[in-house]
């Protein structure tokens, strides 16, 4: 038996624990940055934000979130067929580390340029009175740069300030690009690597996936708390920098322990001596069964896409509403907005072991709960959560105090839906994936669920500028209800299709 598949801790191989640890720190970095992204974009320029209005900020968060889950299908294909999973993760983690370091660049790049030019360019940018980070500058921005630049230096101050403005914007968008590319290589590849630390018939695999998802949840919980506090007390750049520290730990663990703990796992095959170094072709599968599996995955991913659209509001429209309209005071302490994403993770962590016991007991009694019912439950939770936020928005519109308990309960409902849906998802996708395309299938699932759902969350969340918060939340809740109805209507069809595709639901 491979050393990477033997030994270990709590009955699981060291390689599995390494992957779980890497995913923990990577998700700490990812969710920490996401928890404050929309708040940074809409934050005042004087306090280090970009000063954007809600609609463009939510749209960018939606595009970013969508792209983060849209490209792992391509990354998984490259990992499966060309790079090898080990190399793909190393490359992806390196890109993400540089990207996380650049998220704070709107603060430190203008500051460094100011040191070189001998002028206070960062304070000048923050006193412009115009939005930062714009690619196409408006006349207002250009006029502000000219006026403030001449005050710095009559001859060259405007040019220096213009350079500082461009550097801050370029660094930020470069950060998003590198994070998207790195995540594409890592996201679907890591979960497959975790499974590969076991033989295909090893009964411990399902338990490892439970720990894997637990690592994601703990990382998300701690990131919201720590990054939220850091950004509240020391500014947005400090919050982003803490996310970069998490990514540095992830990459350090992987490069330091991977050669020993993952020996012989996820490496590119050298048996095929092609110039591209591609891995051997996957085994041939029955074309009819493959088509049925593809259709099954597409239909179920549609349900999860609807849920994801409602779930991602937590990082977009919900965050803005909580920041602006919810009384977050507890005694003399004001709860940071980023902490609400941690509440979601706390619920996931608390509910996960209870669900594990429940599913086992139900299965022992011959009352197995299939994935369609689990998706139905998740959609109902998202409907109730957005419905509760609709009620809170109506209260705020009437000038009433919105208690912190309302978004707390809303986020908790999302967490209950998330853990039920996603713990069922990993096993389903691994069973439904065509032979030889496990990483690519997982990447395609991310594309069609979290990718498209994240993008749609930005589209729908941006309605707050035109329709208002109450109408936006009501429309999203209605979409969740339609999705839940679709799950019930399609259940018998999906069960028959799964049986013909030889996939257990």
Image (tube, rainbow, N blue to C red):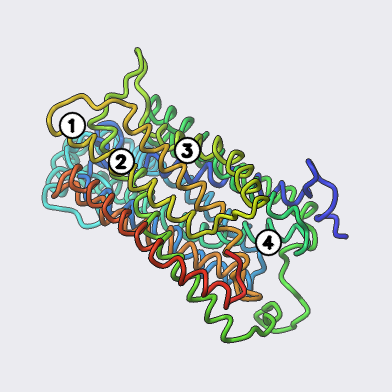
Disc 4 or disc 1, which is closer to the eye?
A: 1
- Discs 2, 3 touching: Cβ within 8 Å: no
The mark nearer the N terminus, 2 or 3, is 3
- Local crowd size for mark 4, using a 10 Å CA cut-off: few (<14), some (14–19), many (≥20): many
Q: Nearer the viewer, residue 177 or 472?
A: 472
The mark nearer the N terminus, 2 or 1, is 2
Q: Secondary structure at mark 3?
A: helix
Distance CA(mark 2)–CA(mark 4): 37 Å
Residue assigned mark 3: 241
Q: Secondary structure at mark 4?
A: helix
Distance CA(mark 4)–CA(mark 1): 51 Å
Q: Does residue 386 sit above or below 395 in this rendering?
A: below
The mark nearer the N terminus, 1 or 3, is 3
Distance CA(mark 3)–CA(mark 4): 26 Å
- Residue drawn 48% across the image and 70% down it: 494
Distance CA(mark 2)–CA(mark 1): 13 Å
The percent coordinates of residue 329 (x first, y second) are 32, 19
**Would residue 451 be seen by someone viewing this image from the given angle?**
no
The mark nearer the N terminus, 2 or 4, is 4
Disc 1 or disc 3, which is closer to the eye?
A: 1
Residue assigned mark 1: 396
Judged from this view, the residue extending furthest toward the front is 365
- Discs 3, 4 touching: Cβ within 8 Å: no
The percent coordinates of residue 205 (x first, y second) are 71, 55
Residue assigned mark 4: 86
**Would residue 435 be seen by someone viewing this image from the given angle?**
yes
- Local crowd size for mark 3, using a 10 Å CA cut-off: few (<14), some (14–19), many (≥20): many
The percent coordinates of residue 389 (x first, y second) are 27, 39
Q: Which mark is residue 318?
A: 2
The mark nearer the N terminus, 3 or 4, is 4
């Amino acid at each position: 038996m491979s050393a990477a598949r033997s030994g270990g801790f709590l009955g699981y191989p060291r390689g599995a624990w390494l992957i779980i640890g890497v995913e923990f720190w990577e998700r700490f970095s990812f969710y920490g940055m996401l928890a404050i992204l929309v708040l940074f974009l809409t934050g005042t320029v004087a306090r280090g934000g970009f000063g954007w209005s809600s609609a463009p900020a939510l749209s960018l968060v939606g595009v970013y979130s969508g792209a983060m889950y849209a490209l792992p299908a391509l990354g998984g294909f490259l990992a499966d067929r060309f790079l090898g999973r080990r190399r793909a993760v190393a490359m992806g983690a390196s890109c993400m580390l540089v990207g996380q370091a650049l998220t704070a660049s709107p603060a430190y790049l203008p500051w460094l340029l100011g040191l070189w030019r001998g002028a206070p360019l960062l304070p000048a940018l923050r006193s412009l009175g115009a939005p930062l980070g714009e690619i196409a500058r408006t006349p207002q921005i250009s006029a502000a740069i000219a006026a403030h630049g001449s005050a710095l230096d009559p001859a060259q101050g405007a040019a220096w300030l213009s350079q500082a403005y461009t550097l801050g914007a370029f660094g930020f968008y470069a950060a998003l690009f590198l994070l998207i590319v790195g995540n594409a290589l890592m996201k679907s590849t890591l979960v497959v690597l975790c499974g590969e630390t076991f033989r295909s018939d090893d009964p411990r695999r399902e338990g490892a996936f439970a720990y894997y998802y637990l690592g994601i949840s703990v990382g998300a919980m701690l990131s919201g708390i720590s990054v939220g506090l850091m950004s509240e007390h020391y500014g947005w750049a400090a919050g982003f920098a803490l996310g970069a520290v998490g990514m540095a730990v992830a990459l350090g663990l992987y490069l330091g322990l991977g050669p020993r703990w993952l020996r012989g796992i996820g490496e590119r095959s050298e048996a095929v001596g092609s110039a591209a170094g591609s891995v051997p072709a996957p085994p041939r599968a029955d074309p009819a069964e493959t088509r049925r599996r593809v259709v099954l995955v597409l239909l179920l991913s549609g349900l999860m896409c609807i849920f994801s659209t409602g779930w991602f509001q937590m990082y977009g429209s919900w965050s803005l509403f909580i920041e602006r309209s919810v009384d977050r005071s507890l005694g003399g302490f004001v709860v940071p907005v980023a902490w609400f994403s941690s509440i979601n993770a706390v619920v996931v962590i608390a509910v996960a072991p209870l669900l594990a016991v429940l599913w086992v007991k139900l299965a022992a009694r011959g009352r197995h709960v299939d994935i369609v019912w689990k998706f139905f439950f998740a959609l109902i939770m998202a409907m109730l959560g957005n419905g509760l936020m609709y009620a809170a928005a109506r209260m705020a519109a009437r000038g009433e105090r919105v208690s912190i308990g309302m978004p707390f309960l809303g986020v908790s409902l999302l967490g209950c839906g998330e853990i039920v849906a996603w713990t069922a998802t990993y096993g389903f996708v691994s069973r439904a994936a065509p032979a030889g395309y496990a990483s690519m299938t997982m990447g395609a699932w991310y594309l069609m669920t979290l990718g498209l759902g994240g993008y749609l969350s930005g589209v729908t969340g941006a309605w707050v500028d035109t329709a208002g918060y109450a109408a936006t939340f009501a429309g999203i809740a209605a979409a969740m209800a339609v999705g839940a109805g679709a799950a019930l209507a399609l259940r018998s069809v999906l069960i028959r299709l799964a049986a013909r595709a030889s996939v257990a639901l």
